[in-house]
Image: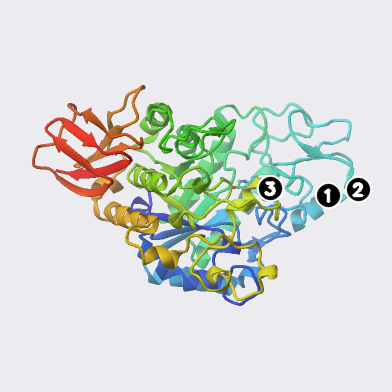
Amino acid sequence: MPKWLQDAVFYEIYPQSFKDSNGDGIGDFDGIIEKLDYIQDLGCNAIWMNPCFDSPFHDAGYDVRDYKKTAQRYGSNEDLIRLFDEVHKRNMHILLDLVPGHTSEEHEWFRKSAERTHNEYSDRYIWTDDWFNSPEGMNYVAGESDRNGVYVLNFFKCQPALNYGFLHPDKPWQKEITDPACTATKEALKDIMRFWLDAGCDGFRVDMADSLVKKDDENKSGTSMIWQDIRQMLDESYPEAALVSEWNRPWLSIPAGFHMDFCLDWPGNCYNLLLRDAKDGRNNSFFHKESSRSVLDFFDEYLESYEKIKHKGRYCLITGNHDTIRAAHFLDVTELKLAYAFLFTMPGNPFLYYGDEIGMRYLSLPTKEGGYTRTGSRTPMQWDDTDNHGFSDAAPENLYLPVDSAEDAPTAAAQKADKDSLWHVVKDVLAIRNREEDLKENANLELLYAKKEERAFAYRRGNLLMCCNPAKEACSIEITAGQFPAGSKKIYEIGTADRNGESYVLGAQSFVIWQV
Ligand code: NOJ
């Protein structure tokens, strides 16, 4: 694992909406440079930036038209390299977003691949050999090219699937993973990675990392072979480059070669139950003060994954991301404080989505650039009380997305000035995380207290004990296992909490850290 990654605390930037430096209504690289000190001051030392490459933007840039060229709206390749330099000057690191499974339908490779005559790119994407042969179980497009056959999609209609082959091909148009055409796709991907690593980026968050080999890829063994090969290239030539997967199956992604994977808000996943569990008008998210949930609803599933990979890689918790509904939609400020204190003191590396540090709200907006319901979580960062909340000098109607116009819309400036704000909890807890080696270590989580019928819980990491009571009533818990000596001291507290021998009295909505 790259050394810097062990201590990394990530801040995710959606470049469209972070900071506009030239008044055109959309964020840009220079705007990000302006705000690097803010990110560092908050306690984050690493950045994940969503795709910033040339694109028709039918999926916010996850439809790449040219992997080696930045989208003009954010700045030039040179501007991006300047951003890398500014990041490194501050001893920070930055991941680009790599989209390996598909391109835009406007990518030059795809245009060539759609031509009738056979050429170098004919098999760069997955095409059937005849339009009658529709690819079973896969989405596809017919009727849009001169080429005989239909092509497979990886996500939206604008995103044709790159061809990495099939584990068990059983149709003439399905290729073996080792077919030269599929190997060429993989080599092209490696070439893109080298291009940006040589330019100074520190690694990649990999979009839909599990999506390379198609159909019947049991246990993702075909896809894993490809990533293992890529990891070997990194280990040999770029040992400090990080690979973080959007996969949500760490027991598969870590052996496949990723350093880290995400615990995401996918349907049925335990992470959802912590912050975003609302069905039929009832908010039952664990950190909601009136929830009926036990933290075991999360831990039972999380620990199973964590145990499998704890010495080999990391399973990371997020406050949210560009695909999730903002947590502030489900939790009020006190609830968010407890939730973040929990997320930032858990194993894995924290990922803070821009604006979550001030509890930016989810806005109900029409879809933009393929965002659909995600659009409301992608609005401009609220810096202060100047025009457009300090995001841009453009006229409001020219903004990429509208800013939150509510009277009480949170801003970074106001929260920095208020010692009781969510922003200060984020800063304080991250400062503890950055200071305490026990919180950086990955394989040292012990769940000390959690019961099916109870709301409060406690966990230990090395010499630190964390207790949390998310409920609106005070309670008391007994911790006998993994006990702490009587002289241990409280180093952080939200709400109130006390201990008396084995008894811990936890006030309503409290979170506390004790240190031996
Ligand atoms: C996952 C990304 O996070 C999401 O925003 C995107 O739409 C899909 N992958 C397709 O690339």
What is the number of the mark on residue 146? 2
The one nearer the camera, 87 or 341, is 341
Please identify the quarter of the rendering in which residue 78 is found. bottom right
Q: Residue 367 location, x and y as percent?
A: 70, 52
What is the number of the mark on residue 331? none
In what element is the residue under mark 1? loop
The residue to which callout 3 is attached is 372
The residue at 59%/72% (across/down) is: 392
- Other-residue count near label 3 (Cα within 10 Å), few / some / many at <14 / 14–19 / ≥20: few
Q: Is residue 306 above or below residue 408?
A: above
Kindly indicate whether the residue at mark 2 contacts the one at mark 1 (C-beta within 8 angstroms): yes
The residue at 59%/43% (across/down) is: 208
In what element is the residue under mark 3? helix
Is the CB–ligand 1 distance for label 3 below 8 Å?
Answer: no
- Name the N-terminal-most of marks 1 and 2: 1
Please identify the quarter of the rendering in which residue 278 is found. top right
The one nearer the camera, 251 or 9, is 9
- Name the N-terminal-most of marks 3 and 2: 2
Is residue 239 among what the camera can see? Answer: no
Kindly indicate whether the residue at mark 2 contacts the one at mark 3 (C-beta within 8 angstroms): no
User: Which amino acid lies under the numbered mark 3 shown in the image of this protein?
Assistant: Tyr
In this image, 378 relative to 86: left or right?
A: right
Cα–Cα span, label 3 and label 2 = 31 Å
In what element is the residue under mark 2? loop
Quarter the C terminus occupies: top left
The residue to which callout 1 is attached is 114
- Name the N-terminal-most of marks 1 and 3: 1
